[in-house]
Every structure is written in structure tokens, then in C-alpha cells.
Image: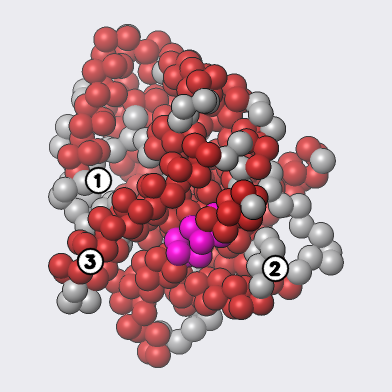
Amino acid sequence: MKNKKIQQALILGLWSFLAVTPLLLTTGPNVVTLTYQEGANRFFSGINPYSPPSPGVDGFFYPPFFAAAWGVFDFLGPIPKILLWVFINSFVFWLGISEWLILKKNQSKWLWFFLVCVAVELDVSLRYQQSNAVVAGLILIALARLRESKNLKAAILLALATHLKVFPVLFALVLALPFHFRFAVSYLSALLLWFILPMSIVGPHQAFSLQWQELSFTTGDFSKRQLLDIAACLDRLGYEAFGKILQRTILILGSLILILYRAVTQNRKFEYGFWYSSFVSLLLLVTPKTESPTFVWAAPAYLFLVKDSSKRTLAILALIGLFMTLIYSSAFPREWVYWFRWNWTSKTLAVLALWLLASGKLWSSHTSKSS
């Protein structure tokens, strides 16, 4: 089974990688990878990576580990480095999917449709040379290890994801709720283990100082930008007050659902797929820094939510796939879908529907097991 997972991930990973390779060879480093490079250059030169960025480069919002890891591969040169980075993102993402789904020839037609949706959404992330795909893949693999009660392996993978982009710490916090003390200790230990890399380069004091600055820099930026979260979306549509109320309501209600489900459900009965789907769609709705490549976090939800779904639910999920992903592909003329594509409006509204569907599935799975 393990070989099948790796084989499937390699095939799908190469498929997605080769689809974007011509574009990568033409454009070279974009603003995202230039930002990574500047952060790494500053880190290795003893300059604060979190100081104001150079013109044409974004702020470096990533942990010190990321800067150290990116700089380690400088010997490759810009283009090979980008190609390796994109392939790693593609492979790890599909490996995460393969931990939960092995495709077969007689697979449901619905599943093949949603596989296309996932591939198209991944393509967006890879084109932007983002880290979102590899982070999502690591989380999915970590959840698969938790399903097998392998707490240490799960913690190591989730800690690595946290050192690439800080938001997986939220997954760890909920997963480490009372009665999961072993996982909490494993996760904290794994965080320190991965932290050896930046500490070995700049020393413990400087590494911890940079980590604190990264957290302050990232959280401080939350109040400065609103992109594709539900409040920003409804604000652009003329419903500013309603958007803010809805965002806070979703945050409170969604958090309660996730936390209570984790607290009352034993590991062997835990619906990790539904839980993941509810979690990532919640994050996309309430995080001000949500942007178009970030929606790849929610793409695996298509495949998770197919499970035991009625035809009506599958039709709803297909509409979500259309408006969150496919409507932005070249398959649809721009004129008649302009309103939906404007400022990625349909992505945000579709992920709202996805959150409702995933949370409903999570709740119904709990009540059915309780009865």
C-alpha cells in the first residue's frame, strides 16, 4: 500500500509539475520566490529578514527555518531552485492526498470530476510559486499518522509545516486538547528539533529573537490588509457591516465545532477528512491574508466530502467546485462570468458554502456515532 501511495503521488505530482514548467521557465523567479530569496540572503548575512522589504519584493512573513532552508539550496541557481521547489510542493501535496485516497479505474465519475478541480486549484498555487501546497500536504500526511496513532511522526510533520508557514500551529493547538498530552509534548519537542537548523547558523539567541519578530510581524500585518476573506468580500459587494458580523460569527461558531468535536471524539472514530475540510474553510473565511493561491488548502475537501454523500450533496459540491475553481480556468468565456470572477468573489462565497457543507458533515458524523 505504501508503494502505491508514493507511485500515485509521483504520477500526479509530475503531471501537475510539468503543466506549469513552461511558464516557470519563461517567467523565472516571481515576487514570491524573490521574497524568499531576500529573506534568506538577509538571514545568512546577519541582517533582519523582517525589516522593510526592497522595492518589488513583499515582506518576509515566514519563520527563520524557512529562510535557512531556502538559503541552503542557493548552489542550484535560480531556475533549478524554483523547479525543485515547485516539484516538492506538487509531490508532497499529492502524497498528502494519496494518504487518504488511492484512485482506481472503476472510481466514481464524481471523484474524477473533483480530482480535476483539485488539480486546477493546485495549478494556481504552483504558478505563484507559493508554499501553500507543501504545507497542506504535510498536514494531510500528519493527520494520516494520527489516524494510525503515530503521535511522534504526526508531530514531526506538523512541526515542519509550522516552520514553513506559521498557521499549522492552530491545527496543533486543537489536536493537543486535553487527553492528548502525548501529542502536545511530541509537537513541542519536534518544533525544537526543526529549530536546530536556524540555531546552528545564527545561534540560539538570535534564532529565538527572529522567531519572535516573525510572529509579531505576521500578526501585525493582519490588521493592515484584507484580501479574500468573507468580510473583505462582502465589503466590496456593499455589505461592510454584515461582513464583519458574519466573519466573527463564523469564527466563533466554527471554532466551537472544531474544538468540541476534537474534545468528545476518540481517535479511532475521528473523521479527520471532514475535520480538516471544516478547519481550512474556516481559516480561509476569517483570515485577512487569504489570497487566491491560499485556496489550495481547501482543494482536498472535494475528495473528502464525496464520502457517503447523496446525489444532492454531490451536486452542491460540484457547484462549489465550479465557482471556487473551474470558473477561473480558460474553459469559460470571461464575459458571462465577469461578476463571479471580479476580485475572486465566487471563490470566497463558494468556500463559505464549503464550510457549511463540511461542518454539517462533521456534525452529522458525530451525532450518528453517538446514537
Q: Which residue is mark 3?
A: 243
Residue 243 location, quadrant: bottom left
Q: Cβ–Cβ below 8 Å for labels 3 and 1?
A: no
Q: Which mark is residue 58?
A: 1
> Is residue 56 left or right of 259 when viewed as pictured?
left
Residue 117 location, quadrant: bottom right
- The numbered mark, 3 or 1, whose residue comes first in the sequence reads 1
Closer-to-camera residue (252/60) = 252
Q: Which residue is mark 2?
A: 112
Q: Is residue 342 above or below residue 253?
A: below
Name the amino acid type tagged 1: Asp
Name the amino acid type tagged 3: Gly
Q: Is residue 175 above or below residue 274?
A: above
Name the amino acid type tagged 2: Trp
Magenta span of residues: 354-362
Closer-to-camera residue (19/133) = 133
> Is residue 70 left or right of 214 when viewed as pictured?
right
Q: Which residue is located at x 54 percent, y 54 percent? A: 362
Residue 356, magenta (yes or no): yes
> Is residue 8 left or right of 175 when viewed as pictured?
right
Closer-to-camera residue (319/209) = 319
